[in-house]
Image (cartoon, helix red, strand yellow):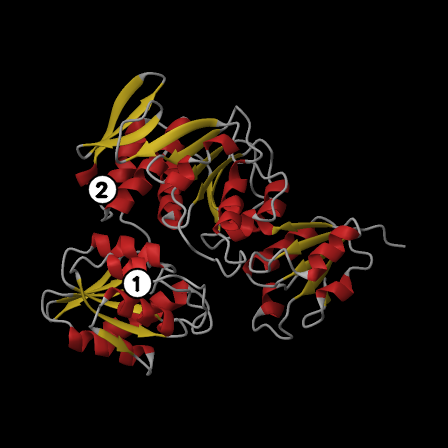
Amino acid sequence: MENRKTALIVGMARSGISSAKLLYKNGYRVLINDIKREIPGLLDALKGIEYVNYLGAPAEALLDGVDLVVISPVIPLTKPFVSMARARGIEVIGEIELGYRFSDRGSRFVCIGGTNGKTTTTTLTGEIFKAAGETTYVLGNIGIPITEHSMDIKAGDVVVAETAALQLESIDTFRPNAAGLLNITEDHLNRFNNSMEQYIAAKARMFENQTEDDFAILNLDDPIVSGLAEKTKAKVLWISQKQEVDEGVFNSDGILYWRHNKETQVIINAKELQIPGAHNIENAMCASALALCMGVSMGVIRQVLRSFMGVEHRIEFVREKNGIRYINDSKATNPDSTIKAIEAMDRPTILLLGVGEYDKYSDFVPLFNAFNGKVKAVVASGVTVPEILAGAEITGFKEFYVSRGTFTEMVEQATKLAKPGYNVLLSPAAASWGMFADYEERGRKFKEIVKKL
């Protein structure tokens, strides 16, 4: 009789696939489950491992004999099968907890959280550690599951991980050696029972297992984030664009400084950064603090900050045609992220909003209030049109157009509204799901359309 442990993987997207492979390689009997009965490409993705296929079956019917449940971050922990599993003594965890457990404990985890700016800061931090000569894995919510490389991660290696609230909900032992939290604004409230308190609590879990040997980098300018200092036993380092700090990184008259152990050093003039916008100064400050507290030299950090050009789908210049610049900011999946993109614009802008069929119950009024004359017209599509329209009406914004055609027709409509010297900015302030697989597919499609204009 087999003496193997059995793992049930619920949700067979990227993290589920990687989790199934990792557990099989480590001797588990693997059951796979998803609400969908068929998932294109799944058979090929799982080639080389043995598993029992329970796609389309109710998860609560699959718990007999199960030792471990690994849950997709998109599945709420309030689902009945989760409480049923726990009542039976079955552990329920997410993919980042699983990946962390199978990584060498001599490795170093550097994690980035926040509603916005995570991907840019994670990518930049990864580039800094790579430039410092460290064996570096850039993983997590950025698109490559930690479980995909857990078996490769050795003592001394650095894992730079983007961590989202939906992932942090299901951790247990996960402990970053250094963790940076950029900001917390309204997002994913549909998932957290329309409760900011629950959303904040999930974000704060990044710090709960830290010790006094670890570092927590907190944004002093964000009242929610700064209030979380008491949630960690780690050494707190601050970042601020508004005031000097005793420990951490601050911006004074456009110069970024590092202050630690009563010594102050210049990092860089913010004008030398290649990534536009005040929010990217904040991202650079967080990345610098994470690297400095982990022992990376100032020279390496300066070199990378001066050369880093940003990430795809985040305020990404696509092309200029007939004096109109097209900018891909598909990564903006909530209003606050779009506000930051608008603040980075230096020309009149036609803004594309919505472009998805998934409603996160966002409030668009603050977005319209942030236009400050820069946005000359809005073209909106998708399921969030009613909420976006409500934001326009409440704030008195008149140049509002609804696109009911294809994405190509939407871009063409924005082009007709633009004049030479304008930007056409895709910064949807909404999720892409239902219309696209993810924000990356949405951004790639936008670039395809623009290049064919």
Q: Are marks 1 and 2 in contact (CB under 8 Å)?
A: no
Q: Which one is nearer the viewer's eye here, 258 or 250?
A: 250
320 in relation to 307, above or below: below
Q: Tell me residue 422's x, y (percent).
A: 13, 65
Q: Tell me residue 191's x, y (percent).
A: 53, 59
| Horizontal relation, residue 342 to residue 99: left or right | left
Of circles 1 and 2, the one toward us is: 1
Give the residue at the far right of this rendering: 1
| Horizontal relation, residue 223 to residue 194: left or right | left
Mark number, residue 427:
1
Q: Tell me residue 394's x, y (percent).
A: 28, 66
Label 2 CA crowd tier, 10 Å (few <14, some 14–19, many 20+):
many
Q: Amino acid at mark 2?
A: Leu
Q: Amino acid at mark 1?
A: Ser
Residue 358 seen in render = yes
Q: Which one is nearer the viewer's eye here, 388 or 291?
A: 388
